Amino acid sequence: MFSSHKTSIKKYITSLLLFFVFLLCLTISGCNIKNPLSQSSKNTTDPSTSIQNTDFGSTILSLLTPEDGSKTLAEEDIQEAFSYFCKQAFLQEISFDSISLHYTLAYPEKFGLDNIKPSFGEAETEHREAISAENYLYLLSKFPYKSLTKQQKMTYQVFKESLEDSIAMADYQLYAEPLSKTIGIQAQLPVLLSEYTFYREQDVEDYLTLLTHLPAYFEQLAAFERQKAEAGLFMHKENALAILNQCDEITAMEKKKDKKNFLIISFEERLQELSKKTVISDKQSTEWIEKNKQTLKEYFYPAYQYLGYVFKDLLKSNENTCGLSYFPEGKEYYKKLVHHNTGSDRNIEELKRLINDRILLCASKISNVIESSKHSEDSSSKKQNTILNEQDNTNNQGNSMVENSVVEDAIEEADHYSLPFSDASNTISYLRTRIAEDFPMASQIACNILSVPESLTEYLSPAFYLTPPIDCNTENCIYINEPQIRDDLSFFTTLAHEGYPGHLYQNAMFQATNPDMLRMILSYPGYNEGWASYAEMYSYRLSGLSDYAVILQENNAILTLCMYAMADIHIHYDCYTEGGLKDYLKGFGITNEEGIHNIYLQILAEPANYLKYTIGCLEFFSLKEETQERLQDSFDLTSFHEAVLTAGPCSFSLLKEWIKQEL
């Protein structure tokens, strides 16, 4: 995570070009590892010739063929066939690796998946994803769209877009990067393993077997990184060194005492939880505990050790110290990656305008508060009571009248903010109650708040939410990385991002609509992270801060998102070097060279990652503003939020059409 930079607001008062910037708490949602390397060469085979030869394909096609030889089927038959198609596609897609399967279904045997052997999947499955996408598209095209139900039509459109996106990305396999300091497989996997819940005894055996496959899986990842290096597409040396150091630190866990090794502690804790559901003898428990220690020693640590050796060797490779735009097809790949990560149909230039327009709007709102401090105190009380509503008016010229001290007091107030509750769980409950005014109510959702293991605090995001299995939605989990969180206000807004009205709430509200299970595994990070960022911005209004403090903090947070998103575009599309980034960040009052270097490395390592949060958030802002303008006085914020949440993860073009139908 990049370093925090904060310029005094007093300096900002004298120069509107300088913005105080605080830690941007990014998150990872879901954490389901789906084959990150399965973006392979595009298949040129006619899908109709291959899919018909599979049991799945032939069954679907037969269901869509009337038995009486007529040309049409009853709508009920078509809808039933589509439900079968979605279910089978879902089951096929989650069966390729055990992590995805386990985090999606707690009891796969109830879905006929009781004979899946433990596996991390294949890191280099050439053609699989592209071929699957084309085959699915072929079958999808056979369904009469008009005969589907409302929900099925949405699933049809979302799945179609997702498949087309997979095919578009398939030509750039070597440009993908599965390993990075913060969101890479090697960083997230230890936490995913420590949270691998034991629902029954077989899960314990599967988990231990899964660990034995890690060396082979990491060998495949290492081979892929060698391919990238040979093609001149290897990562920046300092980012590679960070992964090497991370591998060394995880390997060093072997020497820690059992009580300080989270992979040993969590295993025993999970066994204890399992013992509450089924009888486990002391002998069996002891055998599993010892087997876990031995398996970690023989397979887990050596896998990370091997990956570290490979990265040490790859440090000698030729490197690109600049962004994707310096690679042969880097710009084309970046455009497709941006589209995938954001779900926005805007091209790069349109995204720049979207970001810059929001920067100007936020700067205007902040300057309104600052300008107001130059006037007399006479009408300050009246103005402060209404300013939160007026900040959404883009034509507000900032004619409020408050003393200069009001701004300084607002900054001081935020700097010394204290949480309403010292306990994170109580704060989550507080947020759940407070959102009721503008969001549809959700039932009480069980959630565990856990701390990131000490050995991983340097590498993981400030917080992240693990989505529960579809068939066991009580297993919600939020991890907090406290060393990465600057202060109480950041902690509060982070809990909003992960909990209410962020990821936890959004996932629960969508599941309550009983969607096709296929929808739950389709990747739309722009919607997911955009919503959580939108929720985070909203949470400043729930914090208990004064109106002026809310305006300053909320708009500064949006500015920070925009700054990093624009820096990402400049580096990976506009050919900015680190020197160009320095010049850009000077406009935001950031001049610390070490901090700028860290930002540069972070953006190099994870292209378009910041855009998930920023563009997603800005698209929600734009969608709300467009809906307000269309509905005028009949606009209701709760109804708007409900329409967004019931639509579920999708592209923003589909979401816009959905909301037009709903409101």
Image: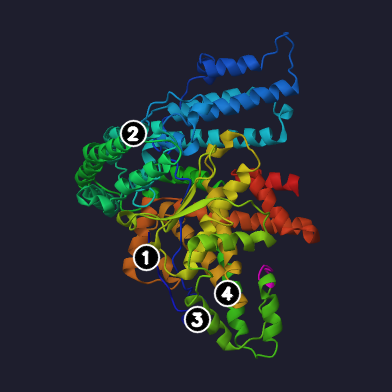
What is the span of residues highlighted in magenta in the rendered image? 390-394
Q: Nearer the viewer, residue 249 or 396?
A: 249
Of the numbered discs in the image, which one, if any, rests on residue 545?
4
Q: Is residue 17 above or below residue 37?
A: below
N-terminal of the two: label 4 or label 1?
A: 1
Query: How many marks overall?
Result: 4
Q: Which residue is mark 2?
A: 210
Which amino acid is tagged 1? Ser
Of the numbered discs in the image, which one, if any, rests on residue 3?
1
Q: Which residue is mark 3?
A: 412
Q: Is residue 614 above or below residue 517?
A: below
Is residue 455 toward the left or the right of residue 255 in the image? right
Q: Nearer the viewer, residue 220 or 481?
A: 481
Q: Position of residue 279 (x, y in %)?
A: 41, 35
Magenta segment, principal secondary structure? loop
Which amino acid is tagged 4? Leu
Which amino acid is tagged 3? Glu
Q: Residue 465: say if magenta.
A: no
N-terminal of the two: label 4 or label 2?
A: 2
> Circle 4 sits in a helix, a strand or a loop, which is it?
loop
Give the foreground label among 3 and 1: 3
Separation of residues labelled 1 and 2 (CA atoms): 36 Å
Separation of residues labelled 4 and 2 (CA atoms): 48 Å
Give the foreground label among 1 and 2: 2
The answer to whether the residues at label 4 and label 1 have Cβ atoms under 8 Å apart is no
Q: Position of residue 460 (x, y in %)?
A: 37, 54
Q: Quadrant of residue 202?
A: top left
Separation of residues labelled 4 and 1 (CA atoms): 25 Å
Give the foreground label among 2 and 3: 2
